[in-house]
Amino acid sequence: MGANSSSINDLSENEYLKRLSGTESISENDPFWNQLLSFSFTTPTNSAELKLLEEATISVCKSLVENNPRTGNLGALIKVFLSRTKELKISAECQNHLFIWQAHNALFLISCLLKVFICQMPEEEMQLHFTYEEKSPVTYQADSEDLIEELLCCLIKLIIDIPLLDITYGISLEAVSTLVIFLSCQLFHKEILRQSISHKYLMHGRCLPYTSRLVKTLLYNFIRQEKRPPPGTHVFEQQSDGGGLLYGLASGVATGLWTVFTLGGVGSKPASHQEQSSPLASQSLLLLLVLANLTDAPDTPNPYRQAIMSFKNTQDSTAFPSSNPHAFQINFNSLYTALCEQQKSDQATLLLYMLLHQNSNVRTYMLARTDMENLVVPILEILYHVEERNSHHVYMALIILLILTEDDGFNRSIHEVILKNITWYSERVLTEISLGSLLILVVIRTIQYNMTRTRDKYLHTNCLAALANMSAQFRSLHQYAAQRIISLFSLLSKKHNKVLEQATQSLRGSLSSDDVPLPDYAQDLNVIEEVIRMMLEIINSCLTNSLHHNPNLVYALLYKRDLFEQFRTHPSFQDIMQNIDLVITFFSSRLQQAGAELSVERVLEIIKQGAVALPKDRLRKFPELKFKYVEEEQPEEFFIPYVWSLVYNSAVALYWNPQDIQLFTMDSG
């Protein structure tokens, strides 16, 4: 590249890149490296320029792939980078811009080369390219694996040790991105990788002692959401002749991959506002998710997952268990705030799920918060805008609600939090509503959407489970929430009647024809009756445990009392209908005694008086409704493809050629 490169088009003919990828071996001490690492060109501004950049990079890399076994220039480049990183911390403290600039450029070149190597060859063959020396053809070092391990350790130490300043932002981001690229072999395998070279180095040996510090640093990068430095605060401002590749490729010290994934690229989604404003936070979170979802080694559980499962609050003074060497402390208040603010992204929602499900310290802390609305409302917004979200994001949001509703304290407290003017809820103006009632409204809306669109039984089950967990603690339900509960039952009732009619007609038709196969209406009927049973149990649980707290639900029940008539004698619902039938009969009688032409206010007053008068022992007790989220037996079959889909669509994909991907990732768009 060098100081003369001023545009992407120049790269394929650049004399420095030609020499790097050519047939001549270059010593680590050659002045060539200072010339190579002083490069810049104009920033790519559209997908066409990004494509040109990739094509130019691939051309150089292919030449290097061919010649590196004889020259060892890849290893020399890595050793040059490693030698320069030894002084990075001092350079940052002394504001040595030039030193950091060239170290960053070296890492950017390595990441570009590494990406193409991963695309073009098996991991074992790529490993050999790290070992070739400038000797006779195809010779390599005896300690052939050390250079990869040394590079990985160097990247980790760079991330955890270098202070985050304007002049170090770019190289910190490039280090995170390069680690993601190192692990991206998974994108080129249709099966889950369980024993890759990068796995081995990250879970054993020299990298292992840095586990907790790396996880902690990545979490703090996410928490702090540091913005990319504005132009003019970078290492070198762009010269009129285009001097310095760093500015052009990465807007100052901004990294090579950074530029690519903030501009949007061919075959991928545009970068989100959060990725554009804080790419280091975005990439740090992606790397954290990738590390946490690496499969366990045959003899060792994933240390990064262990660290995520066990870290504690900085205010927690209890001793760490000796059995977990990867535990650490972090500020839970800052973490909670960041999670509340970032829930529009799949990545943040997945992190929240992991922490609630796997880290009991985080779960206990969050459930004790008195401002849970800051976390729950963004989750409800995800579900409310289900049409705009991918199914995996919706699942994660729903499972988070299910985990939260396992706690009775949460189920009580959400009805005490009053929200005003929920502007994103468009079906009805909600000037004032409890968090609990809003949660019910959104979950019911999700069920109804699922019934008419996706018809996903898993989604249905989890929605109903969350409602069931809350039902015994329903308090002061908003009239609209009460109406929607009964409206959902009405919808299920109509669906039940329709399927029953179809089954009857099908059975009659079969008597006159033996050749036509019958649709399995019995199975459809069984499914819809299971859902109806669950809804009746939810209504019954509320009436049994908190009748006097919910006059609006009783009002809605009485208003639609005819809906329940057909289920009174149905063998599948007869037992659960006893209490509902008793409540309907009791309050109907009191309303009749009060006379005709009653106002809504008068009806509610009679219901409140009747709730006090109704003997509680007349209502039959049923087992408490409690559903607990249980992760699948092989969660990696879902989470690993999901995480790599996030990587592919959110960041690195804008630098990968979509044609190279082996269709490993699930569709997260």
Image (tube, rainbow, N blue to C red):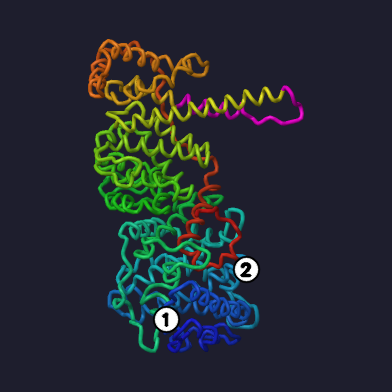
CB contact under 8 Å: marks 2 and 1: no
Above or below residue 65? Residue 273 is: above
Please, what is the three-letter code of the amino acid marked with disc 2?
A: Met
Residues 157 and 51: in front is 51
Q: Which residue is mark 2?
A: 121
> Residue at image x 65%, y 78%?
138
Mark with earlier residue (2, 1): 1
Q: Which residues are magenta?
A: 511-534
Question: Does 514 lie within the magenta span?
Answer: yes
SS category of the residue bearing label 2:
loop
Above or below residue 35? Residue 363 is: above
Q: Quadrant of residue 601?
A: top left
Instruction: Identify the mark at residue 42; answer none if there is no mark.
Output: 1
Disc 1 packing (10 Å; few <14; some 14–19; many ≥20): many
Counting from the top left corner in percent of width and height, residue 339 is at 33, 51
Please, what is the three-letter code of the amino acid marked with disc 1?
A: Thr
